[in-house]
Image: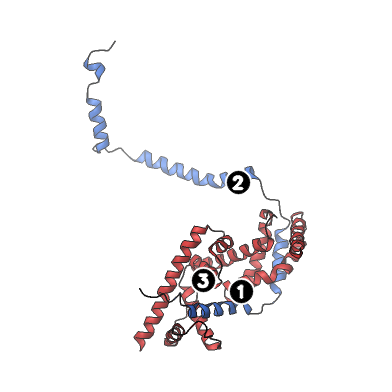
Chain colours: A blue, B red
Amino acid sequence: MRSRISENESLKKVFREAYSAKGTSETGKKWQSQAMRRIRQIGPLRPAAGFWPAFESMVWRLAPVSCVLVLVLAFFFVNTEPEVDSDYLGTMAAEMEKPTLVELFGLEG
Amino acid sequence: MQNDAVRSSDAEIVRQVLDGNVNAFEAVILRHRVLVLTIVKKHVPEDAIEEMTQEAFVRAYQSLPTFKGTGDFSHWLSSIAVKTCYDYWRQAYRSREIPLSALTEKHSQWLEQVLSQRPEEALDDIEPQMEAREVLNWALGKLSAGDRMVLELVYLEGFSVLEAAELLGWSKANVKVRSFRARMKLEKLLRTVKEQGRRGR
């Protein structure tokens, strides 16, 4: 079996060293004031919604999708004619032609 | 004891922010900027560090109502920072903005040299480290955003599967599968580099 290159300890060590060296670059402080400006624009937070408000918002979010789905399915069923020569319908038709027990023995009232 | 004090003051700041004192969040930034910066610096390219750190804190602010206050705040914040980096890569891959530098014969030779060395033989020179970074960046650029993040966390940073799963907000099984798959991809890529070197000779 071939030994795995990625599991070679020397390579792992060198890769890890190179990777950890990435986190040593200097950054400015401008981002802090920009972050606070964005946060102030968002404004005060509202407490986390309970179960029912969250459920309600989810239902409303899914409502358009459900409507489109209903319309697509309705369109599909309206425009699809059943195939008479399909096996299932053929069997059904044959079954319906067979006389029932009631008819055979004249049990009809 | 000191940790408890820090945690309680974190909780106090969070409570103030949730009570409507937006400016109190500045204390969160000042307190945890080093932590978030350290995470972001490792995962995103240099030109995106400040933007992603800022984004991580804005996301943390927006998610503050979901912070339960029972766990460690810095851990919760780390998870947001990691997820922000993951989203950065997802976006970058979607818009195909990943610069892929081609590798040369020099990189193949470097790989051969490292593979023939013993782990205790340190490679302290700048040159090998630069080549390691170039090979690593090239290989990571060939992976998907998810595979990249898992590989960075588990393979390069040494986090356990459970820790990586908590940071990414994924299931343990998902991280395990992704980690295995990403390593296999890395293996294949490194083999290509090695083979290229042999063919070049």
The three-letter code of the residue at mark 1 reads: Lys
Q: Are marks 2 and 3 in contact (CB under 8 Å)?
A: no
What distance separates the C-alpha of mark 3 from that of mark 1?
17 Å
Residue B173: image location, x then y, percent: 49, 58
Residue B103: image location, x then y, percent: 44, 83
Residue A89: image location, x then y, percent: 27, 34
Residue B142: image location, x then y, percent: 45, 72
Q: Are marks 2 and 3 on the same chain?
A: no
Chain bearing mark 2: A
Quickly name the residue at label 1. B41
- Say left or right for A106 vs B201: left
- Say left or right for B46 vs A97: right
The three-letter code of the residue at mark 3 reads: Tyr
Q: Is residue A71 above or below residue B164?
A: above
Quickly name the residue at label 3. B155
What distance separates the C-alpha of mark 2 from that of mark 1?
37 Å
User: What residue lies at 57% left-to-right and 75% top-to-bottom?
Assistant: B45
- Say left or right for B11 vs B146: right
The three-letter code of the residue at mark 2 reads: Ser
Quickly name the residue at label 2. A57
Badge 1: residue crowd in 10 Å (few <14, some 14–19, many ≥20): many
What distance separates the C-alpha of mark 2 from that of mark 3?
40 Å
